[in-house]
Amino acid sequence: MGFLRILMMAPKFYLLALLAFGVAVLFIENQIQKLEESRAKLERTIARHEVAQVEQRHSEFLGRESLATSERDDSVIIYNRVPKTGSTSFTNIAYDLCPKNNFHVLHINTSKNNPVMSLQDQVRFVQNVTSWKEMKPGFYHGHVAYIDFSKYGVKGKPLYINVVRDPIDRLVSYYYFLRFGDDYRPGLRRRKQGDKKTFDECVASGGTDCAPEKLWLQIPFFCGHHSECWNIGSHWALEQAKLNLVNEYLLVGVTEELEDFIMILEAAVPRFFKGATELYKTGNRSHLRKTTEKKAPTKETIAKLQQSNIWKMENEFYEFALEQFQFVRAHAVREKDGELYVLAQSFFYEKIYPKVN
């Protein structure tokens, strides 16, 4: 009987032994994982220490020539601003920041506000921007179409930035701006001053100032100085504008989310934009230039404009720019308690060889 009892109890022993073995395996795996995490943490600490030593030596080298550092700063930003996209509010921030952050701001004023430069002026402009050492670091802004610096055989390319706006909203704002001006220079007489016709009335009567062709502006500004860029309705121009936006521009924001655009710029290029976000939120010059007497168009007016292929192309470009900006923003900022904050650096260097003595 005792032998049979032992045989009957054996499965219980096996089960307990198996359970104990499983617990032991889990415990060992947990310990191994902790050791791996500790090793990875130690490697990161060592890597940061090595980087710190390298940076310290580099800083010591730069420190010996600190007086000449600002003279060697060749940073240049070009903001080829599209009319009526909130550009005045943004450039006012640059003017307020330039004495604090030690850079120059220059307005590109073209004859009759023509966004297309002659070939000789393009050459002059490129040479000025790249060789005018006294104006570096520099922030250039103006209503000028994109210029590809790589075509002119110069060393170093500027950083391009820009802001786009819903095409119909932009056209409506520009329409009333030409008639009533804005709160930036309220006493200045505008080109269409005295014309009381509303935007709705203009569209209903087939006026030229509100025609779909007037929507064709943001695409050519990004497309550049090729003749095809200014052929209204050119699909080649649309695709070239998209390529330039993603390949040649550091950041392109949207008027509707201007504060987010400024916040990301401050994080990416603090050399120019340190303090820009706070200045935009609290400054008295960041919200200037609101078009006066502006009346929102009716749904019928909007629907009529949206029937145009020109609107469809400009809107496609705007939606493309918006999607790209939202992608950048999603990887740059987070929201907490209704406030946005910039993400900290999420990469580091390791396995640096040869080892620092």
Image (cartoon, rainbow, N blue to C red):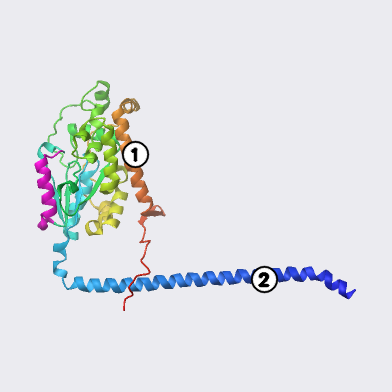
Q: Could you tell me the amino acid type at mark 2?
A: Phe
- Residue 171 visible from this viewpoint: yes
The residue located at (83%, 71%) in the rendering is 7
CA separation in Å, label 2 and label 1: 59 Å
Q: Earlier in the sequence, mark 2 or mark 1?
A: 2
Quadrant housing residue 53: bottom left
Q: Is residue 103 magenta?
A: no
Q: Could you tell me the amino acid type at mark 1?
A: Glu
- Kindly indicate whether the residue at mark 1 contacts the one at mark 2 (C-beta within 8 angstroms): no
Q: Is residue 132 above or below residue 115?
A: below
Q: Nearer the viewer, mark 2 or mark 1?
A: 2
The residue that label 1 is drawn on is 319
The residue that label 2 is drawn on is 21
- Residue 169 visible from this viewpoint: no
Please tell me how many numbered marks the rendered image carries.
2
* Mark identifier at residue 60: none
Residue 303 appears at what percent x and percent y? 34, 26
Q: Is residue 172 above or below residue 109?
A: above
Residue 122 appears at what percent x and percent y? 12, 44
Q: Is residue 102 above or below residue 240?
A: below
Check the picture and name the quadrant holding the C terminus.
Answer: bottom left
The residue located at (74%, 68%) in the rendering is 15
Q: Residues within 10 Å of mark 1 (few under 14, many from 20)?
A: some
Farthest-out residue, right: 1
User: Magenta residues?
Assistant: 116-135
Quadrant housing residue 66: bottom left
Q: Residues within 10 Å of mark 2 (few under 14, many from 20)?
A: few
